[in-house]
Image (spheres, helix red, strand yellow):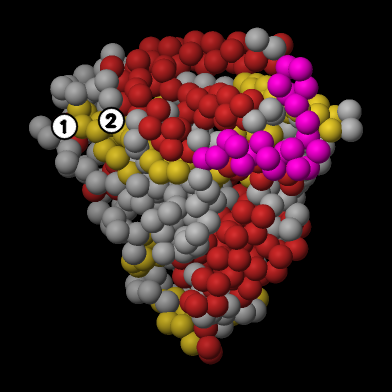
Amino acid sequence: MTARSIRGAAAATVAAVLASTAAACSQPGGPSGGSGPGARDSAVVGIAYEPDSLSPLLGYGKDGNSKIFDGLLALDADMKLRPALATALPEVSDGGLTYTYRLRKGVEFSDGEPFGAKDVVFTYRTILDKKTNNASRTELDAVKSIEAHGDDTVVFHLKYPYAPFAQRTVLPIAPEHIAGKQDVNTGDFTTRPTGTGPYLLTRWSKGEKLSFRANPHYWGGVPKVKKFTMAIIKDDDVRATRLRSGELDGAILPPNLAKGFTDGTRTYAATTYDYRTVTLPTHNPVAGDIAVRRALDVAVDRKAMVDSILNGEGRPAYGPVPTDSEWFARGTERTHDLAAARKILDDAGWKPGKDGIRSRNGVRAAFPLWYLTGDKLRQDHALAYASDARKAGIDITTEAGTWEVIEPRMKQDAVLAGGGSPADPDFDQYTLLKSSLAGDGFNNMAWYDNKAVDRALEAGRRSGDTAARKAAYDTVQRELMKNPGYTFLTHIDHLYVVKDRFGPLTTQVEPHDHGLASGPWWNVEDWTPKK
């Protein structure tokens, strides 16, 4: 184990200690009342990640389904758009360049102040302001201007007919009278938000839990689950242990841990766009070499990963688009072929040494691969990938670390990363692959630079024609075969285990960002706990 891996293991130990401490603090109630697991009108669920901020101005809840806020629109169980703060879907005119929303009347923020058109205008204009630290700003690139027509109408004018624009308006709306009087990047609103949603945040103990209570004045009806807690438990094993011991009512778990639960619980599988991929940084002399990239793309045994790591709960991934999507480019599947991988490397001058590891011009075919500490799925994917690579003569050293450790190394080191959005191919591919976004936080983590892909991404984003968009995203996927700046491994079906006193429940088709806003608790405000 390297020094970095030792630090990663130490971080996991600290996480377990924190989780145990959180457990001791989260059981004040019981079946007859209170706020802990088992309390009749409460729910405590375990999630793997926590947000950096709770402000939609900085990106929180941008894909909808925030418990604190509402968007103009929302997504139902079938991922179809439905009205939320708007009374209906938008009126689209001017050749797809104008979107008009009529707003719901009588809605209040949780502090009692009225919601109106000015709050919508404030939210979108603030996100588009370059002074706002929102890494997702490019998602609203199509917006030319936004204006309020009275208190109950908002009109968006677009620069080009951006086909999925309505799906962007699930973005939560912030109150101008609070957020507009603070520093958008550092003010109290980032950790103590006020919204129109079904729940109010009562406490955020960072690294431990997010606590909510039902909004008694929610325009959609007061939730029957009065207290809702998201316990932040980054370690998969600790999360499973706490669920088994009764400290949690539900949790997201990897397949090998979820299968151990039976009596008194239900397991829910959610189909997803969530992929696991290995970034191959352009600036790394080995990972950035096209021959190495192409060899790794066929050396990896994706089916074995689905079978052994996911227990069949997923599919091989050949790019950001799942194979069962209408946007998937047929013919871009890659067959596991170790002989072909070796030939690609031989032809490119990467020759094996006495230890079986290749080199070229004095450069050894070796690089590190980082994964997130405590994430068993990422660890297992990383180890399997390194094992497959070694059979082709490439030496990959796996390292565990926190994002604080990993992020500064992303320009040179490979990362076992995740992503995926079911809403529209533009939503994930643009930020993943656009060369101009390289080095912009977690956008384009591989510093991928392919001009043909850049052109196709712009064409797909700017065209209002479905066939033209399909052709553009086909081009992207075929270019990723020629020069794969990422090795896509699997698309993962998320598994959740929940006590059956809440069931039966439902799930949506989920993005990579799961657990916090997804899972069976995507509509916790509609749950009716059994008495």
The residue pinned by badge 2 equals 497
**x and y percentages locating residue 365 in the rendered image:** 76, 29
> Could you tell whether 314 is left or right of 330 in the image?
left
The residue positioned 64% from the left and 31% from the top of the image is 392
- How far is disc 1 from disc 2 in space, using C-alphas? 12 Å
Q: Residue pushed farthest left?
A: 531
Which residue shows up at 40% across the image and 28% down it? 308
Q: What residue type is disc 2 on?
A: Val
Residue pushed farthest bottom?
Answer: 94
Q: Nearer the viewer, residue 199 or 470?
A: 470
Front residue of this view, candidates 18 and 102: 18
Left or right, residue 219 beside residue 5: left
Magenta stretch? 336-357
| Residue under the point 31% across and 20% down | 243
Dot 1 amino acid type: Arg
Q: Residues within 10 Å of mark 1 (few under 14, many from 20)?
A: some
- Image height check: is 113 above or below 512? below
- Res 90 → quadrant: bottom left
Q: Which mark is residue 501?
A: 1
Say if residue 380 shows up in the picture. yes
The answer to whether residue 131 shows anywhere in this view is no
For residue 166, which numbered disc appears in the image? none
